[in-house]
Image (cartoon, helix red, strand yellow):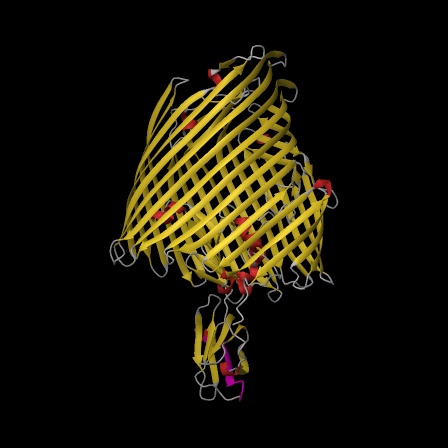
Amino acid sequence: MISHYLFAQSVQGVIVDEADQKPLENASIVLLDTDSIMRYFTRADPNGKFSLEKIEKGEYLFLVTYPKFEILSQPLEIKNDHIDLKSISLNSQSNLLEEVVINQKIPIKIKGDTIEYDAGSFETEKNAKLEDLLRRLPGLTVSASGEITAQGKNVSKVLIDGEEFFGYDPKIAIRNVRADAVDKVQVYERKSDEAELTGIDDGERYQTVNVVLKEEARQGIFGNANASLGTESLFDANIFAAKFNRSERLAFTGNWNNMTNGGDASRIRMNNQIVGRPTHKSGGLNYENNFLDRKLHLTSSYNFLNNGMANESSSYNMRILNDNHTQETTRESDSESDSKQHTLRSRIRYRIDSVSNLNIQLNGGKGQQTSANNSKSTTIRNGTVIANEFESRNSSKSDKEDLDMKVDYRRRLHKNGRSLNLHLNTRIDNTTSTNQVNEQTNLYDSLGVFERDVSVHQTRLVENTNNGMGVSFNLSEPITRQLNATLGYSFNTNSRTGLTNAYDIDSHTTDMTLDSLYSKNEKNHSRNNGVDLSLNFNTEKFNINVTNRMTHRYQELADSYRDVELSRSFWQNNLNANVSYRISNNKNLTIRYQNNTNVPSFTQLQPIQPPTNELYRQLGNPDLKRETNNNINFNFNKFSLLKASSFNINAMSGFTKNAIVNRSIIDEEGRTTTSFVNIQDHINWNGRVHANYTRPILNGIVQFGPFTSLQYANNYEYVNGELNRSNNTNANAGISANKEDSKNVNFNLNLSIGVNNEVNSLREDLNNTAFRSAANADLKYFLPFKFSLTQVLHYGYTGKSKVFPEPITQFYMNLELTRKLLQDESLLLSVKAFDVFNSFNNTNRSFNDNSFSESQQLMLTQYFMLGLKWDFNKNLGKKSES
């Protein structure tokens, strides 16, 4: 103890008025630690002097405050025995310029389960979009294609002020909302819509980003339009326009291109290899407003999508069978498809009175799709003996419509917090299709001698319907100030019909005869009755939620074409527990446990299904039992106020008992017969750990962060009828860096290296360890005369395996030269070059259990484009002159 005080540090100084250098008696002097917790405090004496004694070494935030004076805030590292700050001057607020406002901003905060970023603390380029801002935030990444990851988890929803903005496509929000209009960005895990409405936690979580706009940004007009023309007759046109007026928001988006099946096809950051010959048209409208004195809130969006594709591909697949046998299939195919889809999404929230609320969600869609496919394949056994040849010429035309509605009524019954919730949902799906099937299969015996052929020439008429309805009610009762209980009952029913009439076509007489082998007339019905109990305990530090749902499920299936009648009943129990602990203002810990049972589907139970073709047939197993899943999730967040850094680690582990798996058997003719069985004597399990750290370096100019992840899976599956144990270990580590201050060069870098280890019990000779690495970089150089050059680099390496002895290396470089036009730099002229060296390797590899595949597609990688983009903004994000 004596040595501790002998070597403790001290800080002293004098607090004075900037104007006349007079001492400021009783000024407050505070030292905060990295978690923003006050550790040392004192006041200035009549002479303005202060002294803080017995301070431990470390990094602190030094604060000085005095009434009606500016706040002084600066980092302070204590490492010497004694620090004399000498004279510290504070400026009176009355002496500050009227136009100057001093704000004490904290870049990152943790509010319960929510991480909140102050957007103004992260610099972005002029006219930058929300996508660029998200790249700057510690713990967040945005891929070249616009996929967002937060704390190692994929983000599924992006909200604007808590509301969906073109809810069917989050990329519309991040690529069009201006970064300078954003006040805060909040990241949290959201419960499912059903759990949010009913109060019964079903264990589902969705990583969500909520963007809070500045007050002045809630009124204005903004948007952009661009058009590009390129070699190979390529074109891309895109428009987005929005009008915000406090509570009312109206936005429109449209795109037309022949480069991808999505919008913004000519973005330089994307992997712009053009697969096949695509066409894309889309249009969307989003509307949000309040009515009836703000009692009624409406959010609605409409989307039209038209995608077309013509493609050619070739593939090679090797399946490893038992007893050192192999089966190799080479395939060539060409296809054409076209789809049209209309989608409408609406949400209405109505505040009936001070104690009652009504929520209504209505979603509907209508679409049509046509497709045609020609393919040829040859299958070889053990590298030398032919097993079969297959050729097909198929086409189809289908129509689909769906409608679902959810109604939720909530009423507070008593001032003490008692409430009642009623929930109703219904869904209707209808699909009809006409399929023309022409297939020729040649089968060979074990010596490779032709044995027989099977020809199928059919017209298949398919009608599928699905009608479902559910209702639930829940009563919530506060037991104490911290403990709340919810008791509920739920009932839902679902009916499906599946009719397939396969008619054989006689080429000589054009007569059509029903083929019962390829036909079915199924009727499926299920009923669920469930009882729910949820307990929620909430204090300043802890939030604990435990929910248990016990359900009795009855299902029946009948197929009149096959004389099948099957009925089953199951008891299911789902238990969810969630514990959140706020360790401090800047540290948060969450642990989640989920236990649920999955019952077999109708497809898995149905004894006989119509064959897909002569080479593949699926059989159901009416004796299947339910499987049980246990999942544990762990998440820890920490940030430092002084360093503006963020640290996150999340881990999960899952166990499946009595797992339902596919069991396939391949005969000597290469035909596959598959069924479903339970793994009764073994447990499938997997685990994952991800950690990332982000902090600003070089005086805050660069956001820098290392990351790492480790995954392991231990699974049991069947390989040609025999049980196989496979272990897969995947380790990955890397760094990311981001700079976006519009000076000299901006960059976004991502480097990673990994290793994958595969171990199988049946074929130990195929056990393999493969290395991989990836490097992605986009660099923007700011040149004189309003020119800029963007360079995009991608490098990927996939190591060799026992099946594929040669590794795959992929590299490409894209360039874009731009010139800003007009005084406000809102007009941009660009010349783009994709895959400058024509070096991209379009070979793809994949593996799954005992199957190894390699494929190539028709692909255009090198092309050039000339484009013009206009960014317009009226008032949005600009403070009023008054």
Residue for point 51% across, 29% down: 398
Taking the view exactly as shown, the residue that stands out farthest to the front is: 292
Q: Does the magenta stretch include residue 607?
A: no
The tally of labels here is: 0
Task: Indicate the position of residue 164 as horizontal and vertical percent values.
Answer: 47, 51
Residue 316 visible in the snapshot: yes
| Apparent side of residue 490 relative to residue 598 in the rendered image (left or right) | left
**Which region of the structure is painted magenta?**
5-20
Q: In this view, does 42 lie above or below 342?
A: below
Q: Image quadrant for the N terminus? A: bottom left
Q: In this view, does 576 lie above or below 627?
A: below
Q: Is residue 74 above or below residue 380?
A: below
- Which image quadrant is residue 780 in? bottom right
Q: In this view, does 472 lie above or below 466?
A: below
* Residue 238 or residue 423, whichever sits in front: 238
* Residue 414 or residue 690, whichever sits in front: 414
Residue 325 visible in the snapshot: no
Task: Indicate the position of residue 567 as horizontal and vertical percent values.
Answer: 34, 25
Q: Is residue 16 magenta?
A: yes
| Apparent side of residue 744 relative to residue 525 in the rendered image (left or right) | right
Task: Indicate the position of residue 773 as horizontal and vertical percent values.
Answer: 64, 45
